[in-house]
Amino acid sequence: LQYSNMCLWHFLSSFIYNNYDVKRKPDQSAPVDKAIEYLSTRTDQVLELDEVAAHVNLSPAHFCFIFKKRTGFSPIEYFNHLKVQKACQYLLFTDLRIKEVALELGFTDQYYFSRLFSKVMGMPPNEYREKRIH
């Protein structure tokens, strides 16, 4: 049941972060879709732009250009949003401490994680958990 709840939130929030352009060129959609899938399955890791671009066989500059054109976000910004989205799920549906959530998402510095979370969500992780649970 807990897993189903996490999947539901992931599904619902995917509408927010996937700004798909209906009239996109087919040659640009395949690498971006492949990159989004790659990023989505690796939220627990630390990835570099070069690594993601190499995965879709594009130069980092060209990959960044088509990714931002398609989604409205840079690849790293999109990846950080995915991590924060996953963090929200952990904060709502588990009893993990903030430090443990950060480690689950590949952050070795819980303070950097808290700053990133605050930047994206507008509040620190502990406040987010308190407001959403109560």
Image (tube, grey):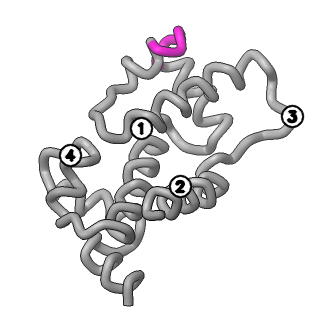
> CA–CA distance between discs 1 and 4?
14 Å
Answer with the quarter of the image where residue 20 lies.
Answer: top right
Q: Which residue is mark 1?
A: 76
**Classed neighbour count for the residue bearing mark 4: other residues with Cα under 10 Å, few (<14), some (14–19), many (≥20):** some
Work out whether mark 2 precedes mark 3 in sequence or the reverse, and give the earlier one. Answer: 2
Identify the amino acid type marked 2.
Cys
Query: Marks 2 and 1, Cα distance to the nearest angstrom?
Result: 23 Å
Q: Residues within 10 Å of mark 1 (few under 14, many from 20)?
A: some
Disc 2 crowd rating (10 Å Cα; few below 14, some 14-19, many 20+) is few
Name the residue located 41 percent from the left edge and 81 percent from the top edge. Answer: 132
Nearer-the-camera pick, 71 or 55: 55
Residue contact between numbered discs 2 and 1, judged by CB atoms under 8 Å: no
Q: Which residues are magenta?
A: 55-60
Element at label 1: helix
Q: Which residue is mark 3?
A: 23
Contact check, label 3 and label 1, Cβ < 8 Å: no
Give the percent coordinates (x, y) of residue 131: 37, 85
